[in-house]
């Protein structure tokens, strides 16, 4: 079994950030918590697409621009809006007992387990940006809850 490469290492290898920038972002993460990718974006070192590209390499999971898809009411009804917003997830499609789920953090086993229990489906995770997921939530569930 091989170890998963760290997001910061991937970004340095791809020349998207410097080791000093990573060090600064890790300092912020130690003080404030949060995802390193979002901290790097907030600091202005990278954009969302840089993070997504690195996550695809890191996680070996597919990226999808979820806000560009029309999701059926039947699929949207599988996940309550509050849960979608809280965990930054959007159900994309269901084929048999497999639910394609777009996630900001596809490695979050607790969320995947909760979705499995709630829907009686196996989860096939996809990665998207926070902005794309939030837009998809607004488009699919409506802005007012």
Image: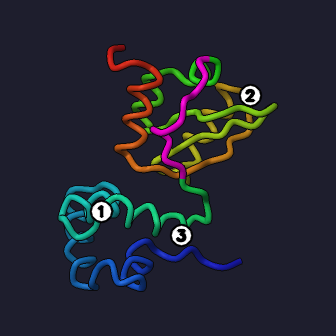
Q: Nearer the viewer, residue 34 or 9?
A: 9
The residue sitting at 34% across, 62% down in the picture is 37
Quadrant assignment, res 15: bottom left
Of pointers 3 and 1, the one earlier in the residue sequence: 1
| Residue wearing tag 3 | 58
| Residue wearing tag 2 | 120
In the rendered image, the vertical position of residue 112 relative to residue 57, given as above or below? above
The region drawn magenta spans 64-73
Quadrant assignment, res 99: top right
In what quadrant of the picture does the C terminus appear? Answer: top left
Q: Are marks 3 and 1 in contact (CB under 8 Å)?
A: no
The residue sitting at 54% across, 64% down in the picture is 56
Give the label on residue 75, or none.
none
| Residue wearing tag 1 | 47
Q: CA distance from mark 3 to mark 1?
A: 17 Å
Q: Is residue 107 shown left or right of residue 23?
A: right
Of pointers 2 and 1, the one earlier in the residue sequence: 1
Q: Are marks 2 and 1 in contact (CB under 8 Å)?
A: no
Q: Residues within 10 Å of mark 2 (few under 14, many from 20)?
A: few
Q: Position of residue 108 (x, y in %)?
A: 53, 49
């Amino acid at each position: 079994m091989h170890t998963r490469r760290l997001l910061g290492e991937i970004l340095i290898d791809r020349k998207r950030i410097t080791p000093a920038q990573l060090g600064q972002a890790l300092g912020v993460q130690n003080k404030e918590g949060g995802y390193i990718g979002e901290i790097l974006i907030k600091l202005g070192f990278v954009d969302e697409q840089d993070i997504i590209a690195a996550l695809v390499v890191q996680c070996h999971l597919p990226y999808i621009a979820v806000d560009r898809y029309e999701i059926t009411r039947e699929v949207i009804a599988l996940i309550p809006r509050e849960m979608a917003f809280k965990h930054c997830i959007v159900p994309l499609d269901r084929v048999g007992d497999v639910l394609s789920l777009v996630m900001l953090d596809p490695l979050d086993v607790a969320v995947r387990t909760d979705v499995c229990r709630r829907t009686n489906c196996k989860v096939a995770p996809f990665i998207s940006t926070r902005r794309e997921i939030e837009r998809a939530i607004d488009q699919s569930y409506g802005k007012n809850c």
